[in-house]
């Protein structure tokens, strides 16, 4: 749950890109485009969807966790199953309430509530089915990020932003899955399925936005497909992460450790992408604000790990009978 700040950064970036588009169309200053209620509603959506996905995943995996992670809240009994269902439901309601508020206070956001429900549906699909069908599960993780990043601005002022998030999450998840030697193991057909799926979604998204701009401009304006110098920042961030991934693989004690470190670093790196887009398309001060989520996220991860260890130490020790000859 500490990584919820990555979702907040994604939403904040999309909202600022939308606000900058409004500045170009009506000339009002950037911060006059943003209603405080709009920002709060968007935060509720991100927190609700992220928490809903995490809690639902823990509920579904509770039997498996009894064997491989008995210290976690549900299998250890620190949280009851009924309580977990209530928390999960409340988080889903929080996302829906935020979506309803956002649709009311944000201009031209009629699709936002539908996108909230669709993203929630993707989360349910992943937790119940897709994660057991490896290529589909890895693609679903990227698609969840993509559609979550479109909630703030369904007009897609800069399509490259949600597309980069989707590709990054899918590729990092695939590499981490492989490095951690998860089962079932990735076979060549799985690799091909993931990358062909990514390519198909990329082409369809670009084609749809291009068609929309040329045929429905008056109804759904937006969808910036222009290759601009502002994209140099995100490109540099991609190159920097590739270097980081290589360093993680070479410096880790084993492949499993490298996979875990890659997944954590890859998710936090989403904030770097968000900040690079805001710096390029909006402004440096606004980009620094988004980048501020990075130390907050890292600090939250450290605190949660410390809290987890404290909870583990507070549990009663378990003794196993050892048969002797």
Image (tube, rainbow, N blue to C red):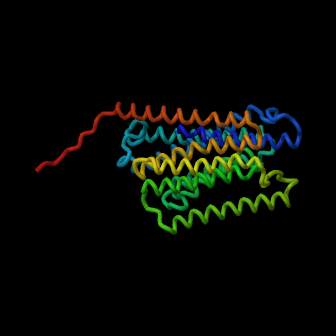
**Quarter residue 92 falls in:** top right
Q: In this orientation, does residue 169 appear? A: yes
Of 71 and 169, the residue lying toward us: 169
Image location (x, y in percent) of residue 201: 66, 61
Q: In this orientation, does residue 116 appear? A: no
Instruction: Identify the residue shown where x is 56% and y is 36%.
Output: 297
Of 217 and 203, the residue lying toward us: 203
Instruction: Identify the residue shown where x is 47% and y is 57%.
Output: 178
Instruction: Identify the residue shown where x is 48% and y is 40%.
Output: 84
Of 315 and 13, the residue lying toward us: 13
Instruction: Identify the residue shown where x is 51% and y is 69%.
Output: 189
Image location (x, y in percent) of residue 280: 74, 43
The image shows a total of numbered marks equal to 0
Query: Outermost residue toward the bottom?
Result: 189
Image location (x, y in percent) of residue 129: 51, 58
Image location (x, y in percent) of residue 112: 72, 46
**Quarter residue 306 falls in:** top left
């Amino acid at each position: 749950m500490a990584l919820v700040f990555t979702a907040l950064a994604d939403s904040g970036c999309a909202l600022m890109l939308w606000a900058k588009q409004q500045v170009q169309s009506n000339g009002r200053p950037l911060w006059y485009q943003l209603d405080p209620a709009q920002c709060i509603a968007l935060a509720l959506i991100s927190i609700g969807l992220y928490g809903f996905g995490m809690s639902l995943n823990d509920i579904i995996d509770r039997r498996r966790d009894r064997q491989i992670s008995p210290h976690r809240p549900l299998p250890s009994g620190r949280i009851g199953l009924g309580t977990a269902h209530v928390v999960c439901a409340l988080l889903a309601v929080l996302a829906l309430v935020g979506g309803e508020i956002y649709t009311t206070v944000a201009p031209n956001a009629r699709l936002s509530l539908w996108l909230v429900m669709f993203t929630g549906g993707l989360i349910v699909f992943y937790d119940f089915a897709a994660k057991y069908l490896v290529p589909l599960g890895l693609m679903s993780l990227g698609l969840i990020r993509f559609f979550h990043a479109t909630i703030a601005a369904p007009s897609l002022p800069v399509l490259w932003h949600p597309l980069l998030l989707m590709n990054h999450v899918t590729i990092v998840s695939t590499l981490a899955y492989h490095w951690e030697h998860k089962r079932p193991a990735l076979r060549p057909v799985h690799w091909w399925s993931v990358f062909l799926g990514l390519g198909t979604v990329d082409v369809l998204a670009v084609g749809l936005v291009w068609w929309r701009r040329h045929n429905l401009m008056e109804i759904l304006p937006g969808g910036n497909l222009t290759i601009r110098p502002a994209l140099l920042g995100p490109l540099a961030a991609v190159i920097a992460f590739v270097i980081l991934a290589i360093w993680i693989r070479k410096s880790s004690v084993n492949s499993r450790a490298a996979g875990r470190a890659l997944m954590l670093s890859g998710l936090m790196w989403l904030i770097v992408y968000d900040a690079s887009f805001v710096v390029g398309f909006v402004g440096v001060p606004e980009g620094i604000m988004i980048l501020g989520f990075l130390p907050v996220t890292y600090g939250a991860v450290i605190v949660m790990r410390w809290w987890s260890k404290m909870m583990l130490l507070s549990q009663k020790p378990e003794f196993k009978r050892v048969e002797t000859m």
